[in-house]
Amino acid sequence: MIRLINNDIEDIDLDFILMEKKENNGDVWYYIRKDEGLSVENSWTKKLEEAEKTFNLALTLNPLFPNAISGKAHCLYEKGDFKECISYLETFLKLNQTEFSVFKKLAECYFFLQNNTRP
């Protein structure tokens, strides 16, 4: 299980996905969702960097874990680091993962890089 306690990552179970929730007032929250749809306790944060730390830890424990790779790619995309995001998305696809959303995100990254724009 991933647990964030006082902004420290304590331990990890590798079945989690980075989620984003936008409030009506414009605030954006990031949290880690378990496969059964519940959020991981103490994982809600307004700082993308804190969510990214979670996936960095997961990747140090298992560099080929698809959910951690896609979570890290999502963080990079949100930060506007499209070149690095492409690297993670391509790694994800090499692991025989064929989710449509990954291809869409990959195409968006190439578009934003070519046109020097951001979403």
Image: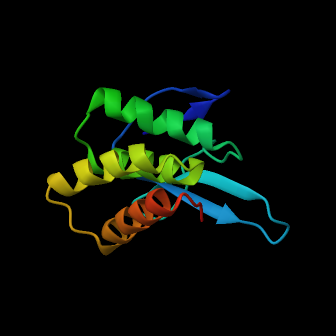
Q: Horizontally, is 27 left or right of 81 in the view?
A: right
- What residue occupies the far front of the structure in this picture? 115
**Which residue sits at x=43%, y=39%?**
55
Q: Horizontally, is 23 left or right of 53 in the view?
A: right
Q: Nearer the viewer, residue 48 or 107?
A: 107
Q: Is residue 2 visible?
A: no
In this view, 5 is above or below 86: above
Which quarter of the figure has residue 21?
A: bottom right
Q: Nearer the viewer, residue 40 or 30?
A: 30
**Which residue sits at x=58%, y=34%?**
4
The quadrant of the picture occupied by the N terminus is: top left
Q: Is residue 52 visible?
A: yes
Measuring from the top left, give residue 96's x and y in whole percent. Answer: 14, 59
**Which residue sits at x=47%, y=53%?**
74
Measuring from the top left, give residue 57's x and y in whole percent. Answer: 41, 29
The quadrant of the picture occupied by the C terminus is: bottom right
Measuring from the top left, give residue 102's x and y in whole percent. Answer: 33, 65
Which quarter of the figure has residue 72?
A: top left
- What residue occupies the far right of the structure in this picture? 25
In this view, 101 is above or below 30: below
